[in-house]
Image (cartoon, rainbow, N blue to C red):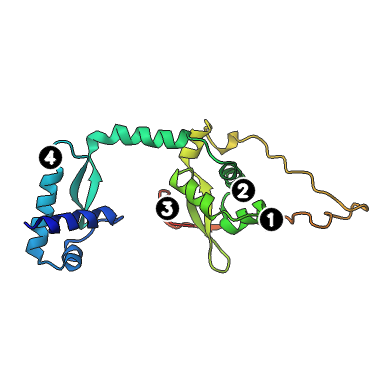
Amino acid sequence: MNPEIVAALEALLFASDAPLPLERVAEVLEISAEATQLAVLELGRACDAPGRGIAVVEVAGGVRLVTRPELAPVLVRLQRLRLKSRMSRAAVETLAIIAYRQPISRGEIEQLRGVGAESVLTHLLERRLVRVVGRKAAPGRPLLYGTTRECLEHFGLRDLGELPPFDAPARATTADGAGPAEGGAPDPEPQSPADPVGEPGDRPGP
């Protein structure tokens, strides 16, 4: 088997976030079905050699690269270190808003914080501290976010009921007490029901 084809197959599987059917692999690599099967077997044998951390498996009608099961403890330690690493103030503020106001959309988070939240949400999603829980019944059907079990574990909480009471900042009023002073932040719009959009582990971009 041509080593360049095997290398191309490895790169293809590494870059894919889902199992690739052999027909798709053959189409991309521009080789026959038989050559594709041989390349998969060759790559599998190479990954089975001592000192390798990945393996080739057939799953869900395709092939993909996975980490070897015996190395799971190393990956668990990595995940724990990620969760323990210090979060930025922006991340903490955004996570607190989501915890108290979930389900909540990115637009509502940005309205409350007064700044963009896309990068912070991406960071929290990557750390599995928040997840997509539905879509808002509004134009564009924006994604709604909520906290995860990992979030509770990170802060040592059994459930959201253990969150401390939320004391909203005092709102400035006009001299006659008629309402908020000019420039005061408006009340965020009420939440709309969420429609389920897949499993809790789903992690689409914001």
Foreground residue among 33 and 85: 85
Residue 168 sits in which quadrant?
A: top right
Does the image show residue 97?
A: yes
Look at 92% across and 52% down and name the residue there.
175
**Residue ID for mark 3:** 203
Look at 43% across and 56% down and name the residue there.
204
> Closer to the observer: label 2 or label 4?
4
Which label is found at residue 188? Answer: 1
Which label is found at residue 49? Answer: 4
| Amino acid type assigned to the residue bearing label 2 in the image | Arg
Answer few, some or many: residues within 10 Å of disc 1's Cα (few below 14, many 20 plus, some between 14 and 19).
few
Foreground residue among 108 and 123: 123
Which mark is first along the chain, 3 or 2?
A: 2
- Under tag 3, what secondary structure? loop
Look at 45% across and 43% down and name the residue there.
127
Q: Would you say the residues marked 2 and 1 are in contact, meaning their CB atoms lie under 8 Å apart?
A: yes
